[in-house]
Image (cartoon, rainbow, N blue to C red):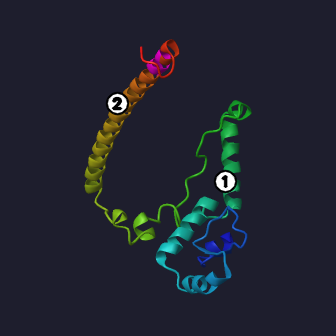
Amino acid sequence: MLEGMILARPVIALDYHNVPRFVPTAWTISASEQIPLVLQDATHPSSAKMEFQGDVLWDCLSWPTPAAPRVARLMLRMVEIAREDPARIRRGQLPTGLLDPPVHTTGAGSVTLKVLYPDNPAFQEDDIARLQVRLARLQKKVDTLEAASKERSFRNTLFAARRGAAAWLRSRSEKRFGRGRKP
């Protein structure tokens, strides 16, 4: 599956057992009647589905280049550190980020929600200032709703306590004076 994704080919999962997959796909066939539609869609893939597939590939591999050269660079870097401070290696104290971060060629860094969900207006806004204003307004609304919810919860707690106290008093009264008898 990953090899097909690396080659930027639409990858289709055949899932007749409906089991969890470690690698999600943009296309899945889980019943025979889906075959024609999925094949047609994969033959002419949308950019949103290909972006999703690239993002899945990035999640799975986390690096767009072969591992062997990176491992060799990592080993050489560790040797450099060992020469500079041998005790550091014995203590197992290596710095993080020994290698440069990857250049994002697919997946993370290139996929946007605007591309993945072109029909959703919430993801079409690119203006950061507008989004910040909208976020501030929504946060204020959330704070207001949370406060109102806490107030309602407090009132409901008081009402339940009053109801419980009344029931307790009734039961005590019934025990003291007998059920159905008036004092």
Residue drawn at 69 percent across, 38 percent down: 83
Task: Please name whichever residue, 138 or 6, is drawn nearer the observer in this view of the structure.
Answer: 138
Q: Residue 145 carries which label?
A: none
Q: What residue type is labelled 2?
A: Arg
Task: Please name whichever residue, 147 or 12, is drawn nearer the observer in this view of the structure.
Answer: 147
From which residue to which does the magenta span run?
A: 168-173
Q: Which amino acid does label 1 sit on?
A: Arg
Q: How far apart are marks 2 and 1 (CA)?
A: 64 Å
| Residue 49 x/y as whole percent | 52, 74
* Residue underneath mark 1: 73
Residue 28: say if magenta: no
Q: Is the magenta stretch mostly helix, strand or loop?
A: helix
Q: Is 91 left or right of 171, judged from the image as shown?
A: right
| Residue 97 x/y as whole percent | 58, 46
Residue drawn at 27 percent across, 52 percent down: 134
Q: Please, what secondary structure does the residue beneath circle 1 have?
A: helix
* Residue underneath mark 2: 155
Residue drawn at 33 percent across, 44 percent down: 142
Badge 1 density bin: few <14, some 14–19, many ≥20, Cα 10 Å = few
Q: Name the quarter where the C terminus is drawn.
A: top left
Answer with mark 2 or mark 1, whichever residue precedes in sequence.
1
| Residue 121 x/y as whole percent | 33, 67
Foreground label between 2 and 1: 2
Residue 171: say if magenta: yes
Q: Please, what secondary structure does the residue beneath circle 2 have?
A: helix
Residue drawn at 63 percent across, 76 percent down: 11
Task: Please name whichever residue, 172 or 97, is drawn nearer the observer in this view of the structure.
Answer: 172
Q: Is residue 25 above or below residue 81?
A: below
| Residue 5 x/y as whole percent | 62, 73
Q: How many labels does the image show?
A: 2
Q: Can you name the residue that lies furthest to the front here?
A: 181
Q: In this view, does 23 lie above or below 8?
A: above
